[in-house]
Amino acid sequence: MSIQAYIKAISYYLPPDILDNQTLAEQFTDWTAQSIEKKTGIAERRVVKKGVLASDLAVKSAHKLFEEHHINRKTVDFLLFCAQEYDYFTPTTACVLQQKLELNQHIGALDYNLGCSGFIYGLSLAKGLIVSGIASNVLLLTSSTLTRMLHPDDKATRTIFGDGAAATLISAVASSSPINNQPHIGDFILGTKGTDDIILKNRWARHPMGKLEPYADKSGSFRSDEHLFMRGTNIFVFILKVVPKMILRVLEKAQLTLADIDLFVFHQANGYILEALRKKMGVPKEKFVIHLKNCGNTVSASIPIALAEAQKAGRAYKGARVLLAGFGVGLSWGATVVVL
């Protein structure tokens, strides 16, 4: 017998305030609500109020996890917090969350800063902690409040991103070899190519204060160094080039084919990108999850949110073989095959 890691439960939280396409169309008059949805696959996105931080959403998602799945919080023995916004420079926000969630004191807790691939990297860290015997129940909190970092006149980003958080419990299970269809998290393919195609310059050591005056790009979107900058065309080319190859590599590593996969759950970047990927790889629509119409791109929380919704709909059932893939800011990417 060996110890494997598996996804035991997922819950998520979305803030109550809604930013719909009609509101954006009234501001950006060259677009209509219908054209925004056609371009992005998004009809509305959730946004946080002023003063609400990523950790606040993470707390709410964790409480939902404990309540919905009847999980004893005292069984958590490691906490991972993935975000791109933290409460303080120090202490680590994961330490703050340990106190707010009333978890045991004999646990490990750490932050890691990743965006769209953050959930996959978190699964890899959680699996490593479990199979090495360091932990038995890892609470992975992925949270994004990226709308706080968007320029109000940047239509390229405001139409895409929404706020939200997910709480995932990854647990240990004794498993026979070969594990086949027993619940487990498989091997990983990870990658990194450092670029500034998605960047927010200000606020940190190398660029504490930069250009504060807003400036426009060729499309008429405005931003400053205080706000997120994204080269959309470069990102699209990167995704179509890297992701299909990554999928083939992770399938080869798992000794599987596309036909062996019951469901594909990718980072919910936007509808156009997801559909382009699906067609390029030849994945049937019924096996491919697109869930962002009513929440937008929630960055590191998008995969667990989409997976949780697929579970509710019966598409991600017990014993299903699911391919998970994240890609984006970094640039970074990662994929794995899990059996639920």
Image: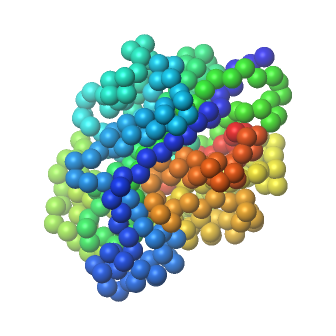
Can residue 33 be seen here? The reply is: yes
Question: Residue 6's quadrant in the figure?
Answer: top right
Residue 87 percent location from the top left of the image: 26, 37
Answer above or below: position of 49 versus 32: above
Answer above or below: position of 77 versus 257: above
Answer above or below: position of 29 versus 209: below
Instruction: Please give the count of numbered marks on the rendered protein.
Output: 0
Answer above or below: position of 124 versus 166: above
Q: In the drawing, does residue 248 fall left or right of residue 331?
A: right
Q: In the drawing, does residue 175 fall left or right of residue 168?
A: right
- Residue pictured at 46% horizontal, 82% vertical: 35
Residue 60 percent location from the top left of the image: 39, 40
- Residue pictured at 40% horizontal, 28% vertical: 110
Question: Residue 231's quadrant in the figure?
Answer: bottom left
Can residue 121 be seen here? The reply is: no
Q: In the drawing, does residue 110 fall left or right of residue 200?
A: right
User: How is the model colour-coded?
Assistant: rainbow
Residue 196 percent location from the top left of the image: 39, 56
Residue 322 percent location from the top left of the image: 70, 47
- Residue pictured at 43% horizontal, 40% vertical: 61
Residue in front for this viewpoint, 329 or 109: 109
- Residue pictured at 56% horizontal, 60% vertical: 291
Which residue is most to the top? 106
Q: In the drawing, does residue 56 fall left or right of residue 66?
A: left
Question: Residue 106's quadrant in the figure?
Answer: top left
Q: Quadrant of the N terminus?
A: top right
Which residue is most to the bottom? 30
Q: Quadrant of the C terminus?
A: top right
